[in-house]
Amino acid sequence: MNVLAPQAALVSYLVRLGDNALILGQQLAAVTGRAPIVEEDLANANVALDLIGQARLWLALAGEVEGAGRTADDFAYFRDPAGFRNVLLVERSGVDFAHATVRDFLFDTWHFGLLRGLERSSDARIAAIAAKAAREVEYHARRSGDWVVRLGDGTAESNARVRAALDALWPYTGELFEADEVDAEVARAGIGPAPETLREPWRRHVAAIFADATLDVPADGWMQSGGRSGRHGESFSYLIAEMQSVRRSVPGERW
Amino acid sequence: MSEANAAAGRWPLWEVFVRSGSGLAHKHVGSLHAADAAMALQHARDVYTRRNEGTSIWVVESRNVVASEPADREMLFEPAESKTFRQPTYFTVPEGVKHL
């Protein structure tokens, strides 16, 4: 493995954290108005706002550490799709409510474990953001977990849909626990947990929720990878275009 | 919205009470639809405490609320209108009374 300069590794790490929150936040914001009932619509929008707020904090800190004058908005709105470093899981589209629920649950559970680890970061700025975000994400994980149980242990139709979603999305969970030179440097410096250490607690929680939901934990087969190094799915450029279109149509405008 | 209305129509209605601070009473803030009590609490949190309104939530299924009949209003409440002596402000405090 290459050894990265600590500062470069930290910027990359913060951009990944920010991009995960930003992309899932955008996904949830994009379906505002389409939930089956208004109460769920508001809940979705709340989660979206939490995540976009977290993305602002991570990306602003990335710009500060980088020291080149980039703001959170510069990161969000003026990078091209290949510049984004989110895991592929968060860019998967919510084909139906079951897909969106399973995607969010698999991510939220991992996200919460990661943030709990980051609360003990050797970097006080990171620990502070993680502490705030962990309280939000604890609720996200509880809500998406409840829905996995409701759908899995619901009707034949909801069970079939959640199984199909799980089969489609499970291959995207491997990337959550990958480690490259950025993760190695971050773990070495005590800034963040080594990804592998998050795996067992994540599996235990996922297995417990699946048991309540009458779902089996899928076998680990071939896993998708690439989002963390900028290789994204085909639909990703549309997602980014929609997110950036207003900002890019009036560069420099202030709201 | 037809799908939305159908889903909402199948789920029972719940009344939501939020306590805004320690020592204060839970106050009725509105109602919502939810499939069960756990979901009602989550919906209440997401719908009614978004602007930092609450420290505690109660939810009660609306069908469990027993209400007085609107037709009984005069019988029940008018007799109290003329009894202003039941208001503490009706009485003047005698001079020299302490610890009030």
Image: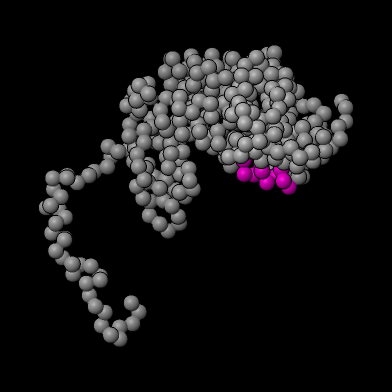
Whole-percent x, y for residue A154 in the image: 43, 21
- Where is residue B94, by image quadrant? bottom left
Please give the name of the residue rendered at 24% of the width and 43% of the height, measured from the top-left corner: B66
Quarter of the picture holding the N terminus of chain B: top left
Residue A206 visible in the displayed image: no
- Where is residue A254, by image quadrant? top right
Residue B18 visible in the displayed image: yes
Q: Is residue A42 left or right of residue A240?
A: left
Whole-percent x, y for residue B52 in the image: 49, 48
Per the image, is A69 magenta?
no
Most distant residue in the bottom direction: B96
Q: In the depicted view, which residue is nearer to us: A157 or A25?
A: A25
Report the span colored magenta: A124-134
Q: In the depicted view, which residue is nearer to us: A181 or A202?
A: A181
Please give the name of the residue rendered at 53% of the width and 17% of the height, measured from the top-left corner: A95
How is colour applied across the structure in the image? Answer: one colour
Per the image, is A132 magenta?
yes
Judged by its main secondary structure, the magenta piece is: helix
Q: Is residue B67 left or right of residue A178?
A: left
Whole-percent x, y for residue A211 in the image: 53, 24
Count of labels in the image: 0
Quarter of the picture holding the C terminus of chain B: bottom left
Whole-percent x, y for residue A150 in the image: 46, 25
Please give the name of the residue rendered at 72% of the width and 19% of the height, measured from the top-left corner: A231
- Where is residue A204, by image quadrant? top right
Please give the name of the residue rendered at 71% of the width and 31% of the height, measured from the top-left corner: A16
